[in-house]
Amino acid sequence: MGNLFTWFNTVFYFDILIIKLWRYFIKPKIPLNEIERLKLLKNFDILDTGVEEIFDNFTKLAALICEVPICLISLVDENRQWFKSKYGLEACETPRDISFCGHAIHDNKIFYVEDATTDFRFKNNPLVTGNPKISFDVSQKLVQFEGRLKNFSATRFTF
C-alpha cells in the first residue's frame, strides 16, 4: 500500500508540474557571468540615453531589408530589457522576466525562435499572447572585445 501511495503522489505531483509548466512561460535564467556582464554594460554608459539617429537608421534599414515589422537594439540590465533603438514598436522597455533577449544573452550564437506561439519557453509569454504578438524572433548578443563592441549585429527581428 505504501508503494502505491508513493507512486500516486509522484504521478499526481508530476502531472501538476507539467500543467504548471504548460500554463506559464519560461523566464530567462541569470547568466553565470552576470556581475561582469552588468559591469561592462554600465561602463558603456549607454543605458537610458536619448535617441540617436545612427542607431535608428540602422534598425530601420535592418527591418526593411529583412522585411520585418519590428527591429530593436536591446540592452538587458538587472530588471529590464531597454531599447536603445526601435523600429515598429512604441515601448521603450520590457521587464527582463518576459524578454526574449534575456534568453539570448547566454550564448554568442544567434538566438532563433521560429514560432514563439508553439515554443514551450514563449507560447504563454505576454509578449506573444498580447501585444506586440511576437511570433518569430532572431537575436544576436552584443560581444565586448578589448573595450569595443565586436559584434554589432545585435538586433532583434520580430514578427
Image (cartoon, rainbow, N blue to C red):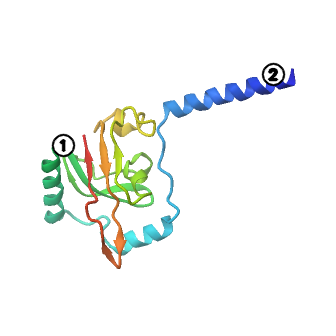
Residue, disc 2: 4
Name the side, left or right, on which 41 lies relative to 153: right
Q: Residue at 50%, 66% (x, y): give it.
A: 33
- Point out residue 19 in the picture as x, y percentages from the top left corner: 56, 28
**Amino acid type, label 1:** Pro
Residue in view at x 28 percent, y 59 percent:
154
Return the x and y of residue 32 as percentages of the image width and height. Answer: 53, 62
Q: Residues within 10 Å of mark 1 (few under 14, many from 20)?
A: some
Dot 2 amino acid type: Leu
Identified at 57% across, 30% down, the residue is 18
Residue under label 1, please give it.
Answer: 69
Image quadrant for the C terminus? top left
Give percent across and percent down for residue 87.
Answer: 18, 50
Residue 9: % across, % down: 74, 26
The disc placed on residue 45 is: none
Residue depicted at x 61% and y 32% = 17
Helix, strand or loop for disc 2: helix
What is the quadrant of residue 143 in the picture?
bottom left
**Measured along the vertical axis of the image, is residue 69 above or below residue 142?**
above
Kindly indicate the quadrant of the structure image that contains residue 51: bottom left
Pair 1/2: label in front: 2
Quarter where residue 75 is shown: bottom left
Question: Which quadrant: the N terminus?
Answer: top right
Find numbered disc 1 in the image and state the secondary structure of the residue it sits on.
loop
